[in-house]
Image: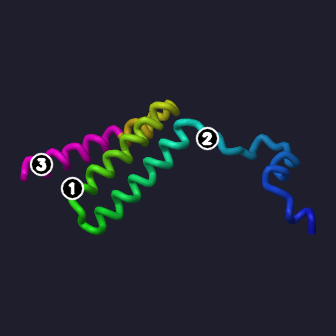
């Protein structure tokens, strides 16, 4: 029964295998706080979009993807940088188009 309750980390150490990978993303540093705050902003932007709250949804999304862009820069992750740079451009165009309509 005790063997079943063994923690995952203990099982990984016992295996001593090169095929078992542990999480490598930082925890508790600046990027950790930015990524979780940005994720909450993106989820809030999605909720506002589904409720058709325009243009606030674009602004909230812009904050979220800007945060993820910063995380990409901190992690030197080209995919995150590219994706979120494009998203920043898309949301900025949406905001400019909305402002020009007013």
Assess whether residue 93 is covered by the magenta stretch: yes
Whichever of callouts 3 and 2 sits on the residue coming sooner in the sequence is: 2
Q: Are marks 3 and 1 in contact (CB under 8 Å)?
A: yes
Quadrant in which residue 49 is drawn: bottom left
Residue extent of the magenta highlight: 85-102
Q: Position of residue 17 (x, y in %)?
A: 81, 43
Give the position of the N terminus as an image quadrant.
bottom right
Residue for badge 3? 99
Tag 1 residue: 55
Please provide percent x and percent y for residue 32. 55, 42
Q: How would you rate the neighbour count of disc 3 (Cα within 10 Å): few for under 14, some for 14-19, many for 20 or more?
A: few
Q: Is residue 96 magenta?
A: yes
Spatial separation of the CA atoms under disc 1 and disc 2: 33 Å
| The quadrant where residue 23 appears | top right
The crowding category of the residue bearing disc 2, from other C-alpha atoms within 10 Å (few below 14, some 14 to 19, many at least 20), is few
Mark 3 or mark 1, which has the lower sequence index?
1
Residue at which label 2 appears: 28
């Amino acid at each position: 029964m005790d063997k079943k309750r063994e923690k995952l980390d203990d099982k990984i150490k016992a295996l001593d295998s090169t095929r078992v990978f542990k999480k490598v993303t930082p925890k508790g540093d600046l990027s950790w706080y930015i990524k979780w705050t940005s994720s909450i902003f993106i989820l809030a932007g999605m909720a506002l979009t589904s409720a058709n709250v325009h243009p606030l949804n674009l602004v909230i999304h812009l904050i979220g993807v800007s945060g993820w862009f910063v995380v990409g820069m901190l992690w030197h992750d080209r995919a995150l940088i590219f994706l979120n740079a494009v998203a920043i451009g898309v949301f900025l165009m949406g905001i400019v188009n909305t402002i020009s309509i007013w």
